[in-house]
Image: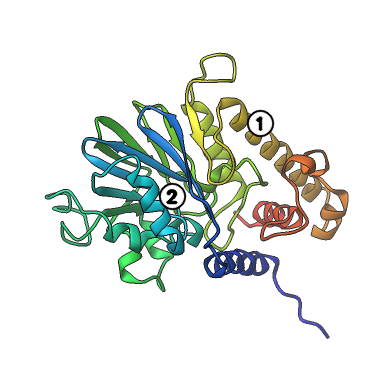
Amino acid sequence: MKRKIPGAFIIVLALAAFAFAQQNQNLNNVEVHLLPVQGNIYMLVGAGGNMTVQVGKDGVLLVDTQFAALSPKILAAIRTLSTGPIRYIIDTHFHADHTGGNENLRKAGSTITGGNVSFDIRDAGEGAQIIAHENVMNRMPATPAGALPTSTYIGDLKKLFFNGEGIEIIHPPAAHTDGDSIVFFRRSDVISTGDIFLTNSYPIIDLAGGGSIQGTIDALNRLVDMIIPVYGQEGGTLVIPGHGRLSDFGDLLNFREMTIIIRDRIQDMIKKGMTLEQVKAARPTRDYDPLFGTNTGFWTTDMFVEAVYKSLSQKK
C-alpha cells in the first residue's frame, strides 16, 4: 500500500527544491541588468527575484538580494549608479531567491550611525541594516546570523525616510507568505511587491509559509488601491513585481482579476463537493493558461490549483 503524501507538503518540497537548485546552479553566465524605473528607483534583474535599488545623497537602499553567488555582479551594477554606502536592505519575504545575497550585500554596506539605537538586534556600523517583518526572522532558523534581519517590525506598517523620500513598508497578512512586505517609494511613485504580484506565473501561495489565496487577493486589492494611473490604466505609479517585467496599473489589475476569477471557480467546485482531482480535471485555469500556466518548473498550474483548493478548504 502506497502512502499518500499531503499536497501541501509537496508544495513545500517544490519551493525548497527550487531554492536549492537556484542556489546551486552555475550562475557564472547570468547577466545582471539595471533598468531605470522613475525618480531615483531602478529595477535590477538577474536570477531569482527582482531587486529594487534606490540611490541618492544618503546612500543606497535595496529591496531583496537575489542569490549569494550573484552578489559581486550585483554590487558592481550598483556601483555604476552610486559609490555611496548600502545603508538599508528590505526583505519582502524569507524565500532564498530573495534573501540569498543578504549577508554579502550587508557586509558591503554600513548602517547610519544611531540607526540601531532602538528596536534593532545588532549594533550600528556593522554593515547595512536588514529590515523585514518579524515573521521573516521566525522562518529563517537555519540561516547564517549574518544574513538574518537586523531590524524587524510587527503590525502592518513601518515608515522610513531616506534619500529625500518617504518609504512605507506595508505588511499584508497571509498573502504569498505570512511575512510579506510591500515597499512603496512615495516621491518616486514606485511599488515593490515581492512575490505577491508576478507577471510570468500564477500566484505562488506558500501554504506552509503562512500564505493563502484570500490573503493574496486582499494584498492585490490593497495594491490596486495604492496605484494612481495617469491615462486610464497606464503610466503613473509603476510596479516592480517579484518576478517578471516592470508593470503598471493595467498589468496588476489583470493579474488581480485572474486570481479572483480562478478563486471563485474553485470555491464553487468545492461547494459542489468536487475532490481535488476532479477540480484539476475540470481545468479551472484553462483560459488563463497561455499567459500564466506551465507544466514544468518549480510552480506548475496543477500546484497552483492545489494550493488554492487547499487554502479554500482549510477550516476557519
The reply, left or right, for residue 153 in relation to residue 112 is: right
* 57 relative position to 299: left or right: left
Q: Which residue is mark 2?
A: 92
Residue drawn at point x = 32 percent, y = 35 percent: 167
Q: Residue at x 87, y 54 (%)?
A: 281
Query: Which element type, helix, strand or loop, lies under badge 2?
Result: loop
What residue is rendered at 83% in x and 86% in y? Answer: 1
Q: Nearer the viewer, residue 174 or 94?
A: 94
Quarter of the view holding residue 259: top right
> Which label was assigned to residue 202?
none
The one of 4 and 240 positioned closer to us in this rendering: 240
Residue under pointer 1 = 254
For marks 2 and 1, give the CA distance: 22 Å
Determine which quarter of the picture holds residue 160: top left
Residue 267 position within the rendered picture, expressed as x and y whole percent measured from the top left: 74, 45
Q: The disc labelled 1 sits on which kind of residue?
A: Asn
Does residue 159 appear to the left or right of 280 in the view shown?
left
- Tag 1, which secondary structure? helix
Q: Is residue 66 left or right of residue 288?
A: left
Label located before the other in sequence (2 or 1): 2
Residue 304, x across and y down, in percent? 70, 53
Position above or below: 24 against 267? below
Q: Which amino acid type is shown beneath numbered disc 2? A: Thr
Q: Position of residue 45 (x, y in %)?
A: 51, 46
Q: Say if residue 193 shows up in the picture.
A: yes
